[in-house]
Amino acid sequence: MNLWWFSFSGVEYGKDGEALVLKCSGATSSNLVTWNKVGPPDKTIATSSFGVNPDYPHISWSYDLTAGFSQITIDPLIAAYTGEYRCTWTKGTENQETTYDVELAVAPTLAALTMKIDNADPPTVVWVAGRTKSVSCECTDGGPAPIVTLYQDGTVLKIGTTSVSASITLTKTPTLTKVLKCIAENVAAAIEKTTTVTVKCMYAFRISVIV
């Protein structure tokens, strides 16, 4: 009876025009290792017996079967080389497959990155010292989903995927302004939006009338 072990490594995003490495672990010197680009029809890219298929000039093959891995490098990655890749190794009745879904990374855009203070756009913000406001950053495009980071004066306040929010209380200091920044980043690019807020104190006045 043949035994099969399957694993899906998820989507592998690569930057257009740069190298992308796909790795298959677990194979040893006594295994037959095959890399396929899944069809239809399936096409053999490389094998441990015959090397790389010349129909794939952007792909190179390397392996260290003593250490237990095989890998292909797509260099450069272009649209024609996206799709599903499968590594299979066989030893007797034991078989294992690892599958990757290769896609080109898409950069996030400034139009999709928003920063809001108390759910409003912050073109010019006056912030009363000691009061708490909600600051949020969100980026609605890019692939893979971008990591979004919120900064105050260069210090990281919050990190998340696609969106973050934080409650911030500013105090008056010798510096009367504070800089808030949102950065959205994935493997394709990093973009940012910045706003400067003015911190002011609230004063209470008492008027005495002398008769």
Image (cartoon, rainbow, N blue to C red):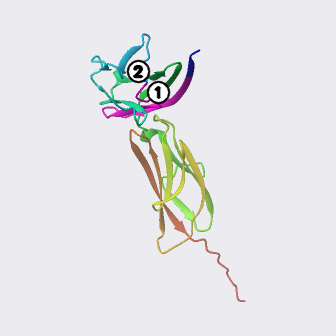
Give the vertical position of 137 relative to 24 (above or below).
below
Question: Mark 1 sits on what residue?
Answer: 100
Does dot 1 land on a helix, a strand or a loop? strand
Q: Quadrant of residue 157?
A: bottom right
Magenta highlight range? 5-30
Q: Quadrant of residue 191?
A: top left
Q: Amino acid at mark 1?
A: Tyr
Quote the CA–CA distance across marks 2 and 1.
14 Å
Quadrant the C terminus occupies: bottom right
Does dot 2 land on a helix, a strand or a loop? strand
Q: Main secondary structure of the magenta part?
A: strand
Residue 73, how many percent across, how many down?
A: 34, 31
Give the vertical position of 166 relative to 82 (above or below).
below
Q: Which mark is residue 202?
A: none
Quadrant the N terminus occupies: top right
The answer, for residue 42, to whether it is visible in the render is yes
Residue 152, how many percent across, how many down?
A: 50, 60
**Residue at left 45%, top 60%?**
154
Residue 180, how many percent across, how many down?
A: 49, 57
The answer, for residue 105, to whether it is visible in the render is no
Nearer-the-camera pick, 50 or 152: 50
Residues at circles 2 and 1 in contact by the CB criterion of under 8 Å: no
Residue 190, how many percent across, how many down?
A: 40, 45
In the drawing, does residue 17 fall left or right of residue 102?
Answer: left
**Residue at left 47%, top 21%?**
90
The 10 Å Cα crowd at callout 1, few under 14, some 14 to 19, many 20 or more, is many
Q: Amino acid at mark 2?
A: Thr
Q: Which mark is residue 34?
A: 2
In the drawing, does residue 141 fall left or right of residue 129?
Answer: left
In the picture as drawn, the residue positioned furthest to the top comes out as 41
The 10 Å Cα crowd at callout 2, few under 14, some 14 to 19, many 20 or more, is many
